[in-house]
Image (spheres, rainbow, N blue to C red):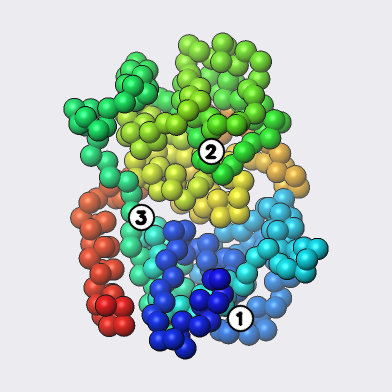
Amino acid sequence: MILQLAGCHRSLKIPCAYFSPCPAWSICFFDTPKEQIGDAATTRTKHEDYYGPPKWISFPTNIGLRPYEVTKLFEDVKVNETGASPVFDLNIANSGCDMFIIRSSRDLEPDWLDYLAEFYNKPVVPVGLLPPSMQIRDSDEEEISLDWLQIKAWLDTQEPSSVVYIAFGSEVKLSHENQNELAFGIELSGLPFFWVLRKGSVELPDRFEDRTEDRGVVWKTWAPQPKILAHGSIGGCLTHCGSGSMIENLYFGHVVVMLPFLLDQALYSRVMEEKKVGIEIPRNEQDGSFTRSSVSKSLRLAMVDEEGSAYRNNAKDIGNKFRNKDLHNQYIHDFIASLHNNHKYV
């Protein structure tokens, strides 16, 4: 359907803008701009071609995938028994649109936004990070729930910036082995934590909650993530690097410990490492496994170790910038102006 729309909108004289909820670097990394670079596009056929940035990226970056991630990428694009590929050609969709609208910011990725505009020779309009509305007041009736009151009561007992918030979103389901290592690593770190476990998660190690009840909470139902992240006791997050979660973490200036499982999450993690606002948990390069020791060390480095102070400071600096309401409003005003300047959209 996407390819059909991309191919026919022009013949029908229908304006087409591509809105991406992911940063520009994700489009640039996975799409191959065939029309612009010609034969160079056909050389990215080996696993190692994805270990670093694409050859046609002209600015310095360390973005790339790990071997176990590239293995998954190649498995995902295999033609199945019906003869159909489970993926579509991004370049057809990207080349077919008239404008890119990106949920991103020039403060986050100026080089990638410029690259996208240059290689597709069309407007690229960042609309800002679109953070959640954070008018949080417990006196507002609609904001009050028994769950939040219970969560807040526990958070209020913790020291400022001491608690690790842990959540892996709705798409990632950890294996039994990964969840065990993660749990033991959290326990080994000795840090206070608030862990949101999605419905259907595998069981935690035996007596984990009993052993950690004096310093941690395992929350097994829906949790108001923005409210929790806004609480003064939260100092950092252990995250899968989903785009929405990362934006909320950036908004609040929390240092992040990163354990990505999907490919777009992996790229987000690499960029946050480049910016030194996040620490990715080391993993086996071939199978993606990790140990409780690596989890514990990464958590302590991010949250309390002196060597991690630069990461904590950088995260706070980014938070101060991205909480600027005037900045977000300006992005929206500029977006509306871009639509008016391109008369076919209005």
Question: Residue flagged by tag 1: what amino acid is it?
Answer: Lys
Q: Name the residue tied to disc 1.
A: 34
* 24 relative to 70 in the view: left or right: left
Residue name at image x 48 percent, y 28 percent: 221
Q: Name the residue tied to disc 2.
A: 168
Q: Quadrant of residue 13?
A: bottom left
* 81 relative to 157 in the view: left or right: right
Residue name at image x 39 percent, y 60 percent: 103
Which of the two discs, 1 and 2, sits closer to the camera?
2
Using a 10 Å C-alpha cutoff, classify the residue at mark 1 as few (fewer than 14 neighbours), some (14 to 19) or many (20 or more): some
Outermost residue, right direction? 81
Q: Name the residue tied to disc 3.
A: 129
Q: Is residue 243 visible?
A: yes
Question: Could you tell which of marks 3 and 2 lies nearer the N-terminus?
Answer: 3
Q: Is residue 235 visible?
A: no
Horizontal and vertical percent for residue 2?
Answer: 54, 71
Measured Cα–Cα span from mark 3 to mark 2: 20 Å
Residue name at image x 36 percent, y 60 percent: 105
Question: Residue flagged by tag 2: what amino acid is it?
Answer: Phe
Say what secondary structure mark 3 lies in.
loop
The quarter in which the C terminus is drawn is bottom left
